[in-house]
Image (spheres, helix red, strand yellow):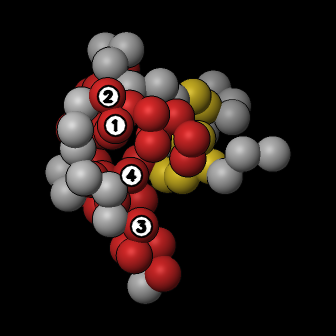
Amino acid sequence: MEEQLTTAQVAQILGVSDQTIRRWIANGSMPGYRITDESWYRVDRRELEKFAKERNLPIDWSILDQ
């Protein structure tokens, strides 16, 4: 199974707000999904890598080690 990241983790990795990530997912800019209808959004690590590469956004994976 692909590594699932929370919107908070993705926000930290990309250096933007959690609200920005949720907005990008809601408007279809960023691939994301909910495990259940009531759950928080999740983003697959590979999808995040692809999203960031297509937009020349730097990724700071060291955030996940903290």
Locate residue 31, reporting x and y percent. 47, 25
Q: Picture coordinates of residue 32 (x, y %)? A: 51, 29
Q: Which residue is mark 3?
A: 61
Viewer can see residue 5: yes
Return the disc, 4 or 2, that comes first in the chain's sequence: 4
In the rendered view, would you say 8 is above or below 25?
below
Amino acid type of the residue tagged 1 in the rendering: Lys
**C-beta proximity under 8 Å, tags 1 and 3:** no
Q: Which residue is mark 4?
A: 10
**3D distance between C-alphas at marks 2 and 1:** 4 Å
Residue shown at 66%/52% (left/top)? 3
Location of the C terminus by quadrant is bottom left
- Which is nearer the eye, 59 or 7? 59
Q: Give the class, few, some or many, for how many residues have Cα within 10 Å of label 2's Cα (few <14, many ≥20).
A: few
- Dot 3 amino acid type: Trp
Give SS at disc 3. helix
Tell me the residue that label 2 is attached to: 54
> What residue is pinned by disc 1?
53
Whole-angstrom CA distance, mark 1 to mark 3, is 14 Å
Tell me how far mark 3 sits from mark 2, CA to CA.
17 Å
Query: Which is more N-terminal, label 4 or label 1?
Result: 4
Nearer mark to the viewer, of 4 and 3: 3
Up-down relation of residue 26 to residue 55 (above or below): above
Label 1: element kind: helix
Identity of the residue furthest to the bottom in this view: 66
